[in-house]
Image (cartoon, coloured by chain):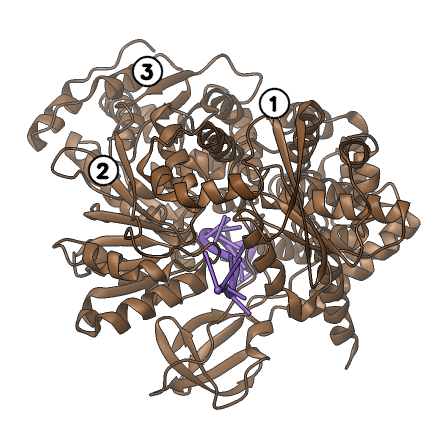
Chain colours: A brown, B purple
Amino acid sequence: MTAIDETPLNAWFAAKGWQPASFQKAAWQAHARGESGLIHSATGSGKSLAAWGGPLAEGLGEVNGSEKSRRPGVRVLWITPLRALAGDTQRNLRDAAEGVGLPWRVETRTGDTASSARQRQRKNPPEALITTPESLSLLLSYTDADRYFRQLTTVIVDEWHELLGSKRGVQLELCLARLRRLQPRLRTWGLSATLGNLDEAMATLLGPGAHRGQLIEGSAPRPLRIEALLPEASGRFPWAGHLGTHLIDGVIDHLSQPGSCLLFTNTRSQAEIWFESLLRARSDWLEGLGLHHGSIDRELRRRIEAGLAAGDFRCVVATSSLDLGVDFSPVDRVIQVGSPKGVARLAQRAGRCGHQPDGISGVLCVPSHALELVEIAAARRAWADGDVEARRPLRLCLDVLAQHLVTLATGGGFEAPSTLEEIRTTHAFADLSKEAWDWTLTFITRGGPVLEAYPDFHRVARDHQGLFRIADRRQAARHRMSIGTITSDAAMQVRYQGGGYLGTIEESFIVRLRPGDVFLFAGRSLELLRVRDLTAYVRRAGRRRQAVPRWQGGRLPLSGMLADRVLELLAEAADGQYREPEMQALRPLLEIQRQWSALPAPGRLLVERTRSREGEHLFIYPFAGRLAHEGLATLLAWRLAQRTPATFSIAANDYGFELLGAEMPALQETDLRPLLSQEGLVDDLLSSMNASELARRQFRDIARIAGLIFQGYPGQGKSARQLQASSGLIFDTIARYDPDHRLVDQARREVLEEALEIHRLRQTLSHIEQADIHLAETERFTPLAFPLWAERLRNRLSSQSWEDRVARMIGQLEKAADRP
DNA sequence: GACCTGCTGCGGCCTG
């Protein structure tokens, strides 16, 4: 392979009135030289054609050249993380293939593909196939996978940054290793948005054994205008809160301009509330307002997306469900309500906005409380300096490995030594030990020491040739139904009496309502009629809502990168420098903070102590993000109680945490140092958090991925409770009789890493060791303390500490499950 | 003076 002939591509571009960009040509030629790599560019920059051009030109050459190209088999595989992207991708690629005169079939294979089409596809594979990581894994579980992929020359992984850092990414790494084994000269091209660790992202995609790939830089990052909606000079600005609706008038002014807008919120209920508030303020906009989040029925969402593409909407209120996907032309404006949380996240959302007259896309940030103004200024600075968060790939997830091995066993079967070698070519399992490998093999063949007596766990058997194969057809069917690494709890459906489906809410919310109560969902006021079989039946209500559903979702902490920038800006304020407009608007508040206490800064840990009717409050501000603060707060409370028995209430946010006790011992710097030491960190954390309860919960997901828990057949899935109960049982049994079980160990590790961000927590403690501790006794709650106080108050109904709440919730679920 | 929230994503029987 040398250079490709670009003539047909150039002609096709010319027919469209385009000019191929130099990075596109670079990618085509790199592909022709047999190289792999990563293409980094903004969305809409022609990345897709950069990745496709090479294979298209090559395919053209083969078709004209030899008969060998007539052999059936997929030649190009396109992986997308989103079903919703598959259709658009297929259309675009089909168009491109036709445009250059390449007689290839371009098809899609996802969960949406009809089973007749799947069968046809298996017999008669298309030349180009668009699919998801899960469907690729399914394809590998068929016995004819070898034949199917024998002709494969290229894999293109779209939105690789979305998969990187999750178990979906690990699953894909494993599948790619298998494909490379089938086809050693396979070329892999990833497409990625901006990321702090592009080199690592590429190395992970290609595998550590690969020759160095090509990192192809597309068009330069677009300039981005990050602005804040500032309160009027005379207006008060709330010290705490999260909704941001106090600024609705400003938002409405903004929306009154012609053109379309996407308004992003951080949570689903916030989206519901904003949609309702906008509608209440401007009922004449009824037709032009849309709502989009992950709990709304997919069909309803699809209609909103289509309307957005058609330009029917003035404004669509959305959560991350519209961060990517959906091939709509850019909107005219993007608004972000509440904390941006991270630079990459804000940039991605802003990227939904087309160029404004001056050629710059922009996002208007609506702070939901005063201190968020700092975050907005911080995000702007970080972006200007080219700082974007990294996403770290996961390693050694044995649950995913176990699933993949059963997939291979269900396909043609696998041979142990060469498969170990193959697995070790992935980034995730490059350091897989022989012991862990042997353990995994035992796990899928016999279920391990504890479960050996149960035939259900003898999923894979070794045949007379020494090949590991799936035990029987029933196991194969069960396995295929459990492929994938995304786990989610059973949700309650919301339906009209007539059967119309609206979406899902959580049981914990609906049990608080009685028939006749009115709640807001999918942008409608709904009256609850009755609840039956995990379905809430509703009808339209004339009255205004009394309740808004809450979903218990992930809690994205402020990124470390943004937190550092926030601290930097506060340090400048401490020096009297207020450069950004946001900082100027915040000046009065920060001056109060400085007068009553002090401003935190890098290298200075601020600790405040306040006495109130409630007791003694201790506020500490490490700026390490909410999850790490929850861990730190629990750790500190536990260490304090080790000295003198006492109980503390705890609150945490992205900036710091609070401990409240009836009495608080005198705490000078010398007292605090050992309490905030790294020594014995993990042990203390584990003892303080009732970690086994947390690990139990984490274990549920791991057990599902590893295939220990069968979720039931489609449509009659076990309820979340049953699942929780059976996983709890398995966990307890294993933890008791096989304490070194690697999946239990993995559950503990994942709790530390994901629920507590232990790396960040550790780093914070090490910074504190170097830092000056500034102790302040304050008369009142300072501006930094107030949001924490409010945060804790919110939890007053269940005023137990965080880990107790989690443990209690699990206990309740299990109790409920034990009842007939 | 004051507060009430927690994202997204996939897949599923059939070997003629």
The mark closer to the camera, 3 or 2, is 2
Q: Residue A361, labelled with which disc?
A: 2
Of mark 3 and mark 2, the one earlier in the sequence is: 3
In the image, what residue type sits under mark 3? Ala
Residue A425's tag is: 1
Q: Quadrant of residue A814?
A: bottom right
Residue at 12 percent across and 28 percent down: it is: A12
Q: CA distance from mark 3 to mark 2?
A: 35 Å
Quadrant where the image shows the C terminus of chain A: bottom right
When asked about the image quadrant of residue A303, the answer is bottom left
Q: Amino acid at mark 2?
A: Ser
Left or right of A160, for residue A401 = right
Q: Amino acid at mark 1?
A: Thr
Describe the element under mark 1 as helix, strand or loop.
loop
Residue located 25% across and 29% down the image:
A223
Say left or right for A227 vs A204.
Answer: left
Residue A461 lies left or right of residue A102; in this view the side is right
Q: Is residue A144 visible?
A: no
Q: Quadrant of the N terminus of chain A?
A: top left
Could you say which is closer to the camera, residue A565 or residue A689? A565
Name the residue tied to disc 3.
A32
